[in-house]
Amino acid sequence: MENANRVVSSEAEQLVLVDADDRETGFLSKAECHDGAGLLHRAFSVFLFNADGELLLQQRSVSKRLWPGFWSNSCCSHPRRGESMQLATSRRLQDELNIRSTLEFVYKFSYQAEFSDLGSEHELCHVYLGRMNTPATANRHEIAALRYLAADVLTHELGQTPQIYTPWLQMEWRQLISEHRDVLSRYAELS
C-alpha cells in the first residue's frame, strides 16, 4: 500500500562533493551537482533480491529530471551533507520502497553520463546488495512501477533493450557479473 506521507527527494538537498579518492571536497545542491556535465559527488546504488533470488527493479518516475521512465536498480540516491552511507541507504529504502534491509557493500566506482541537454550524473557510487524480507511498496512520487527479474533475464534484457535502462544500472550489473560474481551468487541464481 502506498504511503502518501513518504518523503520526496528535492533538488535543493545538499549533496557531498568528492575527489577521485572519495574524500569530501564540499557541498552543493542536487540541482547544481547535476547541471551541465555534472560535478563528482557521492552516491549509492542498492540491488535488493527476494527469497526467490529475483532482483527488484524500479521504473523511475516520469517527473524525474534525469532518465525519467527508465528502469533502474532497486534504489539509488545520495547521502546528504553530514549523513553516513548507512543512514542514507536506510533512509532512502524507507522513503522509496517502505522497507528495511541489511546491506552488504560490494564495491565503488565513478562514472559520468549525460542525459541530453538536461544534465548529467557524475558520481562516485557505492554499490550494495541486500535481501528483502517484506514486500516493497513504491513511493509514487519517486517510482512509476516495480518489477522482479531473475538475474539471467536481466542480463538478457540488457543485451536486447539497453535503451530502457539507466546507464548506471548497466555499468553496475556488468561489473557485478564479471568481477563480483561470487558475492552476487549469494543473492541470485546465476547460470
Image (spheres, rainbow, N blue to C red):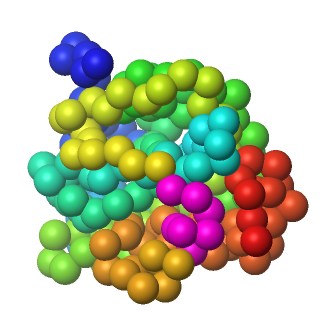
Name the spot of residue 11 as percent of width and height, x first.
22, 43
Picture coordinates of residue 103, whole percent (x, y): 69, 35
Q: Residue furthest bottom?
A: 160
- Determine whether, in the image, residue 106 is placed left or right of residue 159: right
Task: Give whichever of 61, 27 is nearer the camera.
Answer: 61
Tell me the magenta residue range: 149-155
Is residue 39 visible from the viewing direction of this image?
no
Residue 73 position, x and y percent, is 47, 54
Where does the image place residue 87, in percent across and percent down from the top left?
A: 57, 25
Residue sitting at the far right = 182
Judged left or right of residue 47, residue 70 is left
Image quarter in which the C terminus is found = bottom right
The residue sitting at 25% across, 39% down in the picture is 142
The residue at 32%/80% (across/down) is 163
At x 74%, y 65%, the residue is 190
- Which residue is more in the foreground, 155 or 71? 155
Q: Nearer the viewer, residue 174 or 22?
A: 174
Indicate the quadrant containing the N terminus: top left, top right, bottom left or bottom right.
Answer: top left
Name which residue lies at 43% across and 29% down. Answer: 136
For the stretch drawn in magenta, what is the main secondary structure?
A: helix
Residue 135 shown in magenta: no
